[in-house]
Each structure stands twice: as C-alpha cells, then as structure tokens.
Image (spheres, helix red, strand yellow):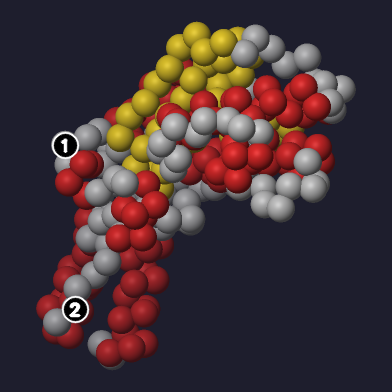
Amino acid sequence: MIDRYVALDIETTGLSPSTDRIIEVGMARVEEGIVTESYSTLVYPGINVSERIEELTGICNEDLIGKPRIEDVIGNIVEFIGDWPILGHNVIFDYSFLKKAAINAGLTINDDGIDTLKIARRLVPEAEHKSLTFLCEYFNINPGRSHRAYDDAISASMLYSAMKKLNPEDSGFKETTQLVYSVKKDTPVTQAQKRYLQALVSKHNLKLEIPIEEMTKSMASRQIDTIIAQYGK
C-alpha cells in the first residue's frame, strides 16, 4: 500500500501551462494519513489575474505584489517533493505547470502520481459530479477554503483516505501512475522581437494582455503575427 505521498495543489491564472502562470502552491507531506510537513506560498506571476480567477480563488493582483516568482521557489518545491509520489485531484494539471517551471530551471521533478479524480471515477460512479468540491460534500469532508492551494491539497488527501475505506484493494491505493507531460525549455523573447512589438503597439495604440518582458520567444512571435493579421505592419 502507498503509505506516503505529497498532497499538492496549485492555483493559476488560467488553464494553459504555455501561456498561464502559477499564483499559489500548496503541499503537504502525508505519512500513513498524517500531515508531517507543509509548504504554502503565493507566487507573483508577472501578468494580471483576471476577475474570473479572483472571484474563484479570492486572490487578487495586490496580494501577489512582492511575492516570489516561480523561478525563485521551484527549487524548494522540487526538493520538498523529492522522490515522494504526488497526489492531487486531476494531478496532471498541477504537474504540467510545475514540470514546465522545473524544466526552465534545469531541474527534474518526480513523475510518480496519484490522481484522486481517476480513483473517484472508478469507485463512486454514482456521484453526479467528480469535482473536488462536490466530492468533499459527497464524503462529508470540510474543504476549508476551496480553490486555495493548500486547502485543496489537504482536501484531496482526505478524499483519498475516504475512498480508500470503500475499496482498499483498488489499484490507486497500491501503485502510482507515471505522470506524462512533454514540455520544452522556454526561450526568452529576443531584443529584435521586443523592438518590433513595441513599434507595433505604439503605431496601432494597443494594450497587450501580457507585458513584452514576460513573453517567451514563441509567445512574442504569435503576438506579432496576430497584430499584423488584424492591423497590418
């Protein structure tokens, strides 16, 4: 049986690891159902948090000012996880963002995963919804502050324990699954791209959603193509 893991959850500015950013990370080392160590931090994303994300998480742009960037803390995160399996609800989502950050920093993150969403689909097919919020209510689990990273990580761990009581022989409690997400290291925006974008923005009186300094080379290229297609050179 799996008797230790790192319960993990992140909050982000959106759903895409290629364009969106992490704004909060919450983790707990859990041994035989007991939290032995915890980690939680807000993260400055370098881009604005939308009203939708603020409404969902309660995290606003002002909360993130002065907080560390993901590149400043990814080493601590990878070290905290170590060789422990990563548990989460739809854990591949959280893993994809963290792997991207790890690759950019030249680090390797453990890819052993435990997905409470996949287990729930097997063990409680009768549940109308499989979201973490719904399943916490289904199993009478106090979710704390839903859509906050550390609370959701703990909720996923408690959900795992609750489902284990239903069928401890399920494979999800005996073995991990490999988390697979392919990502390449980001290439910074070039000086030539910066100058060209700045000229386009000035000429067409535009406001970019992502600051030029926060763009990667590929993001800048797509942004240039989009502006030219809509407004011309």
Spot occupied by residue 22 in the image (x, y as percentages of width and height)? 38, 44
Is 66 situated left or right of 25 in this image?
A: left
Spot occupied by residue 161 in the image (x, y as percentages of width and height)? 68, 22
Spot occupied by residue 186 in the image (x, y as percentages of width and height)? 41, 49
Question: Alpha carbon of mark 2 to alpha carbon of mark 1: how far?
Answer: 27 Å
Foreground of the two, 198 or 36? 36
Q: Amino acid at mark 2?
A: Leu
- Discs 2/1, front: 1
Q: Residues within 10 Å of mark 1 (few under 14, many from 20)?
A: few
Spot occupied by residue 19 in the image (x, y as percentages of width and height)? 41, 57
Is 172 situated left or right of 33 in this image?
A: right
Quadrant where the C terminus sits is: bottom left
Residue 91: image tag:
none
- Residue at image point 36% right, 60% down: 52
- Residue at image point 34% right, 54% down: 55
Is 41 situated left or right of 156 in this image?
A: left
Task: Identify whether 187 is placed above or below 74.
Answer: below
Residue found at the far front of this picture: 140
Q: Which residue is mark 1?
A: 66
> Which quarter of the picture shows residue 145?
top left
Is 2 situated left or right of 217 in this image?
A: right
Residue 108 visible within the image: no
Q: Which residue is mark 2?
A: 206
Q: Amino acid at mark 1?
A: Gly
- Residue at image point 31% right, 60% down: 50
Foreground of the two, 122 or 226? 122
> Which quarter of the picture shows residue 146?
top left
Quadrant where the N terminus sits is: top right
> Which quarter of the picture shows residue 91?
top right
Label 2 secondary element: loop
- Residue at image point 29% right, 45% down: 59
